[in-house]
Amino acid sequence: MSNAEKGSLYEEALKTLREAAAILKLEPEIVDAIANPEQALIVSIPIKMDNGKVKTFTGYRVHHSTARGPAKGGIRYHPNVCLDEVKSLAFWMSIKNAVVGIPYGGGKGGIACNPKEMSQGELERLTRGYSAAIARFVGSDIDIPAPDVGTNAQIMGWFADEYYKIAGKHEPGVITSKPLSIGGSLGRVTATGRGGFFVTVEAAKAFNIPLKGARVSIQGYGNVAQPIAQYLHELGCKIVAVSDSVGGVYNPEGMDPLKLVEYKEKTRSVKGFPESKEISTNDPLTVDCDILVPSALENQITKENADKIKAKIIVELANGPTTPEADKILQEKGVIVLPDVLANAGGVTVSYFEWVQNRMGYYWTEEEVDEKLKHVMTKAFKEVYEIAKQYKINLRTAAYTLAVKKIFEAMQALGRI
């Protein structure tokens, strides 16, 4: 994708904001105030590579909004990272945090690099360089990063250590999704899938879709999808199709999600799982099922395949898996879409719990984390569902309407608009 094409990504991201603003009857100048990011930082990070040569990387950190609290959002390491992408992701974090009602604004960061081609030593030096470069831009009351594509708990640990040295103090609340040994939260690893599960259960009740015997199809079988597969299986759902980047498997009688995990750990893919038919990576999107869970990359459900989807409910655990054109087709077909800004917000919610625990210096049991997560996700679904009914709109537009109203009210209360 060229930079020219990427330049339109932020405008695409703002389309649903404008729909929500029209429902709320907000003036165009108010929409502009909400749409534009507050601050954007671009940094150069020269590091010594293993071959002894110095290579300079470009890093970004964007604060979209801090009206509702400190900025919050991940750090992405990927070759395609650019300012427009980071701005869009920061905007989506503002929406997501407002939908579930946690007291954060939206932020995002990233470095244009290919972590798959870098050694552990190079990644550590890059991370420490980035942490030092943006140290004045982050903090537990300012902006709290977390992992995203291409980053993990270890990278968060390096980031935190460098920040502590610069700040001259131990401040674990500066970053979330850390290893447990340095202040991470119990329940964080399964949080996104667990949150999606709670929303699915509420949606099934609201739309009278029985879960016992419901057929579930999943695209992407990593850390996000594996927990929801297990929880739905325990409720009596059948996991009929699963795929990853290598291939997929299908069995209309259902498959054991834990055995799929064990098989994938041994072979690095679900492809070839015993007693199943081989399918492609994208086939789970269109197999005969009741619940479809896209958990891989963005833009997987498009105008080309949307009319072939047979699911009654789509649970968006990936970020942006459905294009706007596909959304319209799905709505006409009567497919219920649980949007990403609601369905996958369990991860950032437990990151918020981690931040709260860090600031208190008091840590909760996994049961306490789970109970609090269920409360947040259930409440958020009910609020979005009520708005959808009130305005006769789909759940995505309803989620944005709820979020934009909260951001507008916060900006108004602060006297910013």
Image: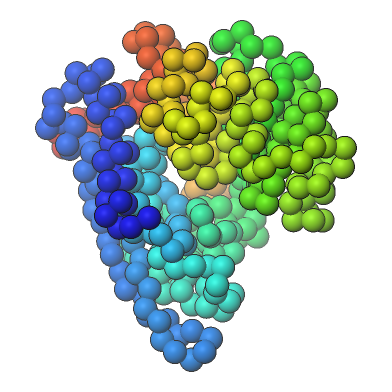
- Going 40% across and 59% down the picture, which residue do you hit? 80
Q: Residue furthest front?
A: 304
Which residue shows up at 38% across the image and 31% down it? 324
Q: Is residue 387 above or below residue 188?
A: above
Nearer-the-camera pick, 363 or 120:
120
Instruction: Tell me the residue at 77%/17% (across/down).
Output: 213
> In this orientation, does residue 66 appear?
no
Q: Quadrant of residue 231?
A: top right
- In screen coordinates, is 106 left or right of 212? left
Give the tally of numbered discs.
0
User: 155 left or right of 43?
Assistant: right
Residue 247 visible within the image: yes
Q: Who's the residue at 64% across and 55% down the image?
A: 180
- Name the residue furthest right: 275
Image location of residue 146, percent across then percent down: 48, 53
The quarter of the image holding the N terminus is bottom left
Scheme of colours in the image: rainbow
Quadrant location of the C terminus?
top left
How far across and down, in percent of the image, does residue 26 sit?
18, 23
- 237 to the left or right of 393: right
When the figure is inspected, residue 308 is found, relative to residue 145, above or below; the finding is: above
Observer-nearest of 118 and 180: 118
The image quadrant that residue 256 belongs to is top right
The image shows residue 281 at horizontal and vertical percentages of 64, 43
Q: Tell me residue 375's x, y (percent).
A: 56, 25
| Residue sitting farthest toward the bottom | 52
